Image (cartoon, rainbow, N blue to C red):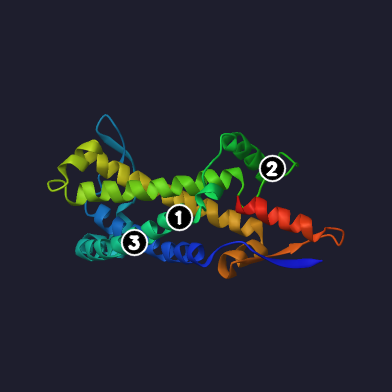
Amino acid sequence: MKVIKEKHSFLMRWTHWVNFPVLMIMIWSGLFIYWANDAYGISIFGYSIIKFFPEWFYNYFHIPQRLAEGMAFHFLFMWFFFINGLLYILYTIFSGSWRELFPKKNSFKEAWQVLLHDLHIRKTIPPQKKYNAAQRIAYTAIIFMGIGSVLTGLAIYKPVQFYWLCWLCGGYHFARILHFALTIGYVLFFMIHVIQVILAGWNNFRSVVSGFEVVELNPEVSSDKIQTEDNERAE
């Protein structure tokens, strides 16, 4: 017996799908700004060992000539990133959805079990309602990463006007390092997120698009039990 159950609200799905292309453009344009001053790498005794991008990469994409383009796109789409993120946070607060996303006291222990299960080391499926423990931690972390990107971005965009914010971020250069590190964090998050979506299967992906999922139930399952599961998921 198959039933269709609501899983994701419209606003949750809207902010999710809007955020993906916006953040991609932010990373793309931010790299143009970074490439204008490729300051980071690994050096020993003044000798550069590792640079993030080789010289041929700059020459192929004509990167030195695209600083203004990167700044224009970055400063435009940062507003979409900020507004979309703010809308998502306000929705989770006022709708009570934060209870499904925020980690619990045993989430870190259960997240380890999720990792072992995903690596096929542990056969037992970890506890899961709408989101498992690993998802709770990851989705909460990405919210704080977004807040960090906005604050550090303002600190390096207007270090004089927002001198107090720049000071809180550890100064201009450290704020720039944090901003760059958060960008690397987004890339890693996306890679893991896409892999997890593929492993979760079509039904899970469809629920993020349509908001509903198809659930297989035994004929013996009573309507009272289905209602109980819905109530537990709403808590």
Marks 3/2: CA distance? 35 Å
At x 27%, y 59%, the residue is: 32
**x, y percentage for residue 77?**
30, 64
**Rendering quarter of residue 178:** top left
Marks 1/3: CA distance? 16 Å
Tell me the crowding category of disc 1: few under 14, some 14 to 19, or many 20 or more residues within 10 angstroms, Cα based. Answer: few
Residue annotated with mark 3: 83
What kind of residue is marked 1?
A: Phe
Q: What element carries label 2?
A: loop
At x 15%, y 42%, the residue is: 163
Q: In this view, does 224 lie above or below 105?
A: below
Q: In this view, does 120 lie above or below 17?
A: above
Marks 2/1: CA distance? 29 Å
Residue annotated with mark 1: 94
Q: Is mark 1 on a helix, strand or loop?
A: helix
Tell me the crowding category of disc 2: few under 14, some 14 to 19, or many 20 or more residues within 10 angstroms, Cα based. Answer: some
What kind of residue is marked 3?
A: Ile
